[in-house]
Amino acid sequence: MARASREQVAHRRDEILDGCCALYESKPFREITFAAIAERTSISRPSIYNYFDTIGEIFLGLLQREYEAWIVDLDALREEEPLPREQFCGKLAASLEERRTMLKIQSLNLHEIEDSSRIGRLTDFKVSYCHSVKALDGCLLRHFPQMTEEERERFRLVFLPFLNGVYPYAEPTPKQLEAMKAAGIPRIDATIYDLVNSCLLQLLPEGKETP
């Protein structure tokens, strides 16, 4: 049988990721299997193992793809003329609202997902993640030139871990809402955009007045 071309491999890999992403809209991580993914794709369950060894690797691949899409948005934001703080925060928050799947996966036990993946796949993801951090830093350099390297580092140390908790806070499950009600915890209705925008406004300095 002829060996698949690089384009065919990439297409099949994306098809697997698309199938997993579609399932993840309605099923929790623990219920997603190779068999369920195969039912949503043209790829058989045994053939999926030619691309991914574990479910964790599939989710890591999906997360990597999300980060690469976010980098495109960050690069576009960096190319804009310097923005006032409120406008910058709104645009960055909107870019993350578009990355709902990325934030949802990060709210899982990412340590376990990474640990169940081969070192090569994990390295590929870490490279993409590193590029996203550099792209984010490029946005800060462009729009907040008054920030020092130490200030940008402090921003990253707060903001990046903060993103791990955004999804479950913005979108609690019905079971979580029931438990919160029973425990007397009021629900604060806030979208991903609201939470990210509020955090950014707290972390980023006021810029210079625009003429």
Image (cartoon, helix red, strand yellow):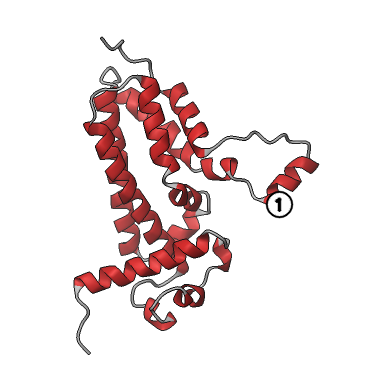
146 to 19, vertically: above or below: above
Q: Is residue 117 visible?
A: no
The residue depicted at 41 percent of the width and 29 percent of the height is 90
Residue 178 drawn at (x, y percent) = 75, 47
Q: Residues within 10 Å of mark 1 (few under 14, many from 20)?
A: few
Residue 95 drawn at (x, y percent) = 38, 39
The residue depicted at 33 percent of the width and 52 percent of the height is 126
The residue nearer to you, when weighing 58 against 92, is 92
69 to 144, vertically: above or below: below
Residue 150 drawn at (x, y percent) = 32, 24
Q: Can residue 58 be seen in this view?
A: yes
Q: How many labels does the image show?
A: 1
**Residue extending farthest bottom:** 1
The residue depicted at 29 percent of the width and 57 percent of the height is 124
Q: Mark 1 points at which residue?
A: 175
The residue depicted at 50 percent of the width and 78 percent of the height is 35
Q: In which quarter of the image is the N terminus?
A: bottom left
The kind of residue on which mark 1 rests is: Lys
50 to 105, vertically: above or below: below
Q: In which quarter of the image is the C terminus?
A: top left
Residue 163 drawn at (x, y percent) = 47, 40
Image-quadrant location for residue 57? bottom left
85 to 74, vertically: above or below: above
Image-quadrant location for residue 189? top right
Quick one: SS at disc 1?
helix
Q: In this view, does 56 lie to the left or right of 172?
A: left
